[in-house]
Image (cartoon, rainbow, N blue to C red):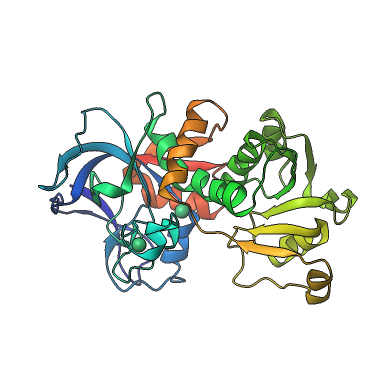
Amino acid sequence: MFAARYVPGKKELSLVDIPKPTPGPLDVILKIRAAGICHSDLHVLHGEVPYKETFTMGHEACGEVVEKGSEVTENYSAGDLYAVHGPNPCGHCNYCRTGHDNLCNDPSRTFIGLGQDGAYAEYLKVPARNIVKVPKGISPEIAAVATDAVLTPYHAIKTKGGVGLGSKVLAIGLGGLGMNGVQIALALGAEVTAVDLKDANLEMAKSFGVQNVLNSKQISSLQPLSFDVVVDFVGLESTFKDAQNFVKPGGTILLIGLGSAQVPLTTATAITFETKVQASFWGTHVEMQELYELIEQGKIKPQVQTAPMKEVNHWLHELEAGRIKSRMALLP
Ligand SMILES: [Zn+2]
Ligand SMILES: [Zn+2]
């Protein structure tokens, strides 16, 4: 089968022909219908995450179950879509058993498509416990990108940020995650202000119902210390500084963006105002089920472009150059 594989030291994926995977007793084989590309792929290709092994990349997967292991009792119907919970938790450690499976600390687990074979291929082997049924009516490409680009902001904003009815939320950055994030905050009943450098993104946010939008250049016109929750989707020194300026005393900064390796915290202000800085990572299996319901109800409309999977290297370059508007899914 076709697969696009990461080879340590290479800056591009190798497009190769490899054997189709066979399931272990507790696995299923998905015929991939769509696979999202993500900045995390670029971090790996740039050598920032030093994987020593060769593996098929792609951690945002949606497909149909075409084969299952001898001990899998669940029945799957042809044509039904399943999405993969990329953190690939073990299911039995303390974190997994207490609903924090995004933080699974089983030393032997690796993420799907990041350290072990992922979705840039015709078929993917995955533990049956780590797939989630996609409601009918949701396309494979939306289901695929939702596993990260919706799940990550959903976990951050709802679970870690406690955003709810009447929360005043400032969203910094309207890329793939940010554009979904503002819709999630709205669905939770928040009053949302969004800032971005691109006016087109601001227009789109407005069309989703965001109450206040403004260009990042005008951010100083906002009232300092006035937001319950500030979501930094960018994670640069400058955006994290803005987050500290606009979060209210006792409020929460949600750090999601990996824009720079470090961000500075102004200790005197953070201490005086008891600012909570909450980092957030991906999301849980249960949250994945919840967010597909929100997508099904039309409360979140993830924006996604599609392209043939064999063009993966081209589209990773486009992603790097900032030429992908929101998110992109590759189709085999
Ligand atoms: Zn990702
Ligand atoms: Zn675990």
Note whether residue 120 is visible: no
Q: Quadrant location of the C terminus? A: top left
Q: Nearer the viewer, residue 271 or 148?
A: 271
Q: Residue furthest left?
A: 70
Spot occupied by residue 88 in the image (x, y as percentages of width and height): 34, 56
Q: Residue at x 52, y 32 (%)?
A: 294
Would you identify the image quadrant in which residue 267 lies? bottom right
Note whether residue 260 is visible: yes
- The quarter of the picture showing ligand 2: bottom left
> Relative to 300, is 273 on the left or the right?
right
Q: Nearer the viewer, residue 129 or 44?
A: 129
Spot occupied by residue 1 in the image (x, y as percentages of width and height): 17, 47
Would you identify the image quadrant in which residue 160 lies? bottom right
Spot occupied by residue 93 in the image (x, y as percentages of width and height): 34, 64
Q: Nearer the viewer, residue 319 or 104?
A: 104
> Relative to 53, is 104 on the left or the right?
right
In the displayed structure, 131 sits above or below 111; it is above
Q: Which residue is drawn at 78% across and 63% down?
A: 244
> Relative to 73, is 129 on the left or the right?
right
> Relative to 128, is 61 on the left or the right?
right
